[in-house]
């Protein structure tokens, strides 16, 4: 029986990915995103919350037992059941993962060690110091307008402002070189007249300016692909994704930044 890993599975953004969950089995997150595929966050926690959940001896063994059968893996990806940076032992998981990965033989280059984060804790120097070692950090930024941020992500009241989050992402980009930072923007629609989604022109334009400031290596525009937490939200279509990419490209005006949509 597995304690930490799930998959491997084909990821839209990462290729063949082995997921690693380093949080308790109950969802632990600073947000309660309306589109979350895991379901509602029963208790939204402060970004100051810290848990001690070190890897057991079983983690290294579990990783070895699985990885030897997938020599073509693209990513070992930490983050599923909430916000993984809340675990104070994040670097312990990273170190064991890297040690196991580096001992094995691969059909092509070794899989990257990837971290998902919703960006709410990155204002902390201590958290950024842990995060910067990952080969790739996938950081969330769905909104650059506060009203959209509050409705879309429903953050804990102690979460930092959007300005602080954007500045933190800009700092992380500088601090984690030569590793890579990807910003993920999930854009969705709503079928409720009293709930305007983040798919509005003001938000998309402000997101473009925020992304220009952050200057990430990769920008990923995507939408809902599984059953969301709230039934009134649904995916934008491919044409709208292309329109958003066009707006962002025009604003950032930087061919060095890779922009994808899914």
Image: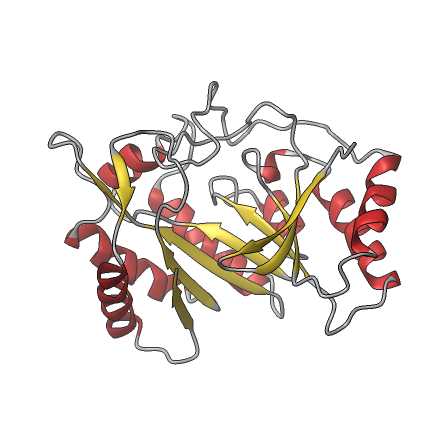
For residue 23, which quarter of the picture? Answer: top right
Q: How many marks?
A: 0
Residue at 48%, 51% in the rendered image: 139
Residue drawn 88% across and 36% down?
57
For this orientation, the residue located farthest to the left is 193
- Which residue is most to the top? 42
The C terminus is located in which quarter?
A: bottom left
The percent position of residue 61, horizontal first and vertical second, equals: 88, 43
Q: Point out the image quarter for the N terminus.
A: top right
Seen from the viewer's position, the closer of residues 176 and 97 is 97
Horizontal arrangement in the rendering, residue 108 relative to residue 125 (left or right): right
Q: Position of residue 164 (x, y in %)?
A: 40, 45
Name the one closer to the observer, 172 or 60.
60
Tell me where residue 191 sits by quadrant.
Answer: top left
- Residue drawn 62% across and 70% down? 178
Residue at left 48%, top 69%? 217
Q: Is residue 188 left or right of residue 118?
A: left
Residue 68 position within the rendered picture, expressed as x and y whole percent measured from the top left: 83, 57
Colour setting: secondary structure
Vertical arrangement, residue 95 with respect to residue 108, above or below: above
Camera-nearest residue between 141 and 34: 34
Residue 20 quadrant:
top right
Q: Position of residue 63 (x, y in %)?
A: 80, 47
């Amino acid at each position: 029986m597995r304690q930490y890993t799930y998959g491997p599975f084909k990821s839209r953004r990462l290729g063949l990915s082995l997921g690693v969950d380093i949080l308790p089995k109950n969802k632990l997150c600073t947000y309660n995103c309306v589109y979350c595929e895991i379901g509602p966050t029963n208790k939204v926690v402060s970004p100051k919350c810290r848990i001690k959940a070190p890897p057991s001896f079983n983690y290294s063994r579990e990783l070895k037992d699985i990885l030897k059968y997938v020599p073509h893996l693209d990513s070992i990806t930490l983050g599923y059941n909430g916000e993984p940076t809340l675990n104070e032992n994040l670097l312990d998981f990273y170190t064991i993962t890297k040690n196991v990965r580096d001992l094995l033989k691969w059909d092509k280059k070794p899989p990257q060690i990837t971290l998902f984060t919703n960006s709410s804790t990155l204002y902390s120097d201590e958290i950024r110091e842990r995060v910067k070692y990952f080969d790739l950090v996938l950081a969330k930024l769905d909104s650059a307008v506060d009203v959209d941020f509050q409705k879309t992500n429903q953050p804990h009241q102690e979460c930092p402002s959007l300005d602080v989050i954007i500045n933190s992402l800009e700092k992380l980009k500088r601090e984690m070189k030569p590793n890579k930072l990807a910003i993920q923007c999930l854009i969705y629609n709503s079928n409720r007249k009293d709930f305007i989604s983040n798919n509005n022109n003001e938000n998309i334009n402000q997101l473009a300016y925020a992304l220009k400031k952050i200057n990430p290596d990769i920008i990923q525009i995507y939408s809902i692909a599984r059953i969301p937490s709230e039934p009134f939200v649904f995916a934008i279509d491919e044409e709208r994704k292309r329109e958003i990419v066009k707006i962002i490209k025009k604003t950032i005006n930087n061919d060095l930044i890779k922009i994808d949509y899914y």
